[in-house]
Image (cartoon, grey):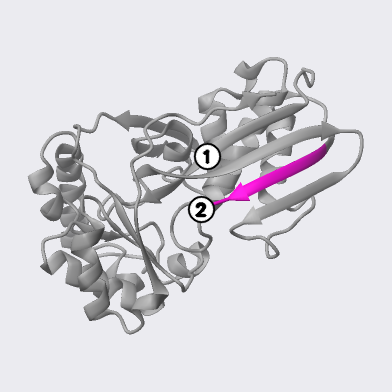
Amino acid sequence: MRIQNTRVSVQVPATSANLGPGFDTLGLALDLCDELTVEATTGSVEVEVEGEGAGAVPTGEDHLVVRALRRGLDHAGAPQTGLRLRALNRIPHGRGLGSSAAATVAGLLLARGMISDPRALDDQAVLQLATEFEGHPDNAAPALLGGVVLSWMQGDTAHAVPLACAEGVLQPVVLLPSTTLSTHQARGLLPEQVPHRDAVFNASRAALLVHALTGAPELLLDATEDRLHQEQRSAGMPESIELMKVLRREGHPAVVSGAGPSVLVLSGHRGDLAPLVRRFVTNPAGWRIAEVRLREIPSAPVVG
């Protein structure tokens, strides 16, 4: 395998995982994208970051995109090279919108675009490698495939299938607090075991959510009920959990986005949600409300 293309670009979307009951399984892609360009060089690694994470993320070999890119080249049997990476980041960090999964998928897709035989890094290979970075495929799968995706593990192998959502079912609105919460911290708040009745409840709601997404939007509120992870994480994001509950009492299918602390309303309008946020949260100026379309196209590298 050889390096064939010395300049490659890619756009990779924000994602929201879990969607309430679909813990570590369901996720969707949002039309809020990081844009990355890499050039192969004869020098060392240079990383230039604009936007989210600028001045905070690493700018050398330990940058996540660089690490993933190098893992992709190794997997394909391609030689390593010097790299000049430019990142325009729009995905907020530490908000439950899949910024790390986007970076990982971006690096792997940039590697795909550089090599002479892209089949060595096909979608299954990218999903598997990204899952090894992430620990689970629920964000990586929609970042790669777009749309709404159902993912699962069979042993150590990651799998994913897109869901054919009915037109108009999803009108996502993201409520973004100024506070952050790492995935590691959020997972540390989860219990080792859950009651059998709660597991049964979530299994029923996850199945119902697939049905609601594919053609029964009137069921989204019931289908997004959860007993496994959101309330259990309330100590790490109390205002987010209470805001989610307020929105749900008002009839909006609101869930915690990924590990939080952002809140995702699967179908709503900014104008309907803003008054509720202003009335409920302590500091409304600390929250941003964004209507973000579902991103349905797969991510792919662009050469040149």
Q: Give the x, y percent position of residue 276.
A: 20, 72
Q: Residue furthest left?
A: 218
Q: Which residues are magenta?
A: 83-91
Residue at screen point 23% across, 43% down: 170
- Residue 119 vs 21, above or below: the answer is above
300 left or right, relative to 40: left
Q: Give the x, y percent position of residue 190.
A: 38, 68
Amino acid marked by disc 1: Val
**Nearer the observer, 261 or 283:** 283
Q: Please tell me which of labels 2 and 1 falls first in the chain.
A: 1
The residue beneath circle 2 is 91
- Indicate the quadrant where residue 104 lies: top right
Q: Residue furthest right?
A: 43
Which element carries disc 1, helix, strand or loop? strand
Quadrant of the image containing the C terminus: top right
Which element carries disc 2, helix, strand or loop? loop
92 left or right, relative to 287: right
- Indicate the quadrant where residue 59 lies: bottom right
| Residue 154 visible in the current orientation | no
Amino acid marked by disc 2: Ile
Q: Give the x, y percent position of residue 19.
A: 29, 52
The residue beneath circle 1 is 12
Q: Main secondary structure of the magenta part?
A: strand
Magenta-colored stretch includes residue 88: yes
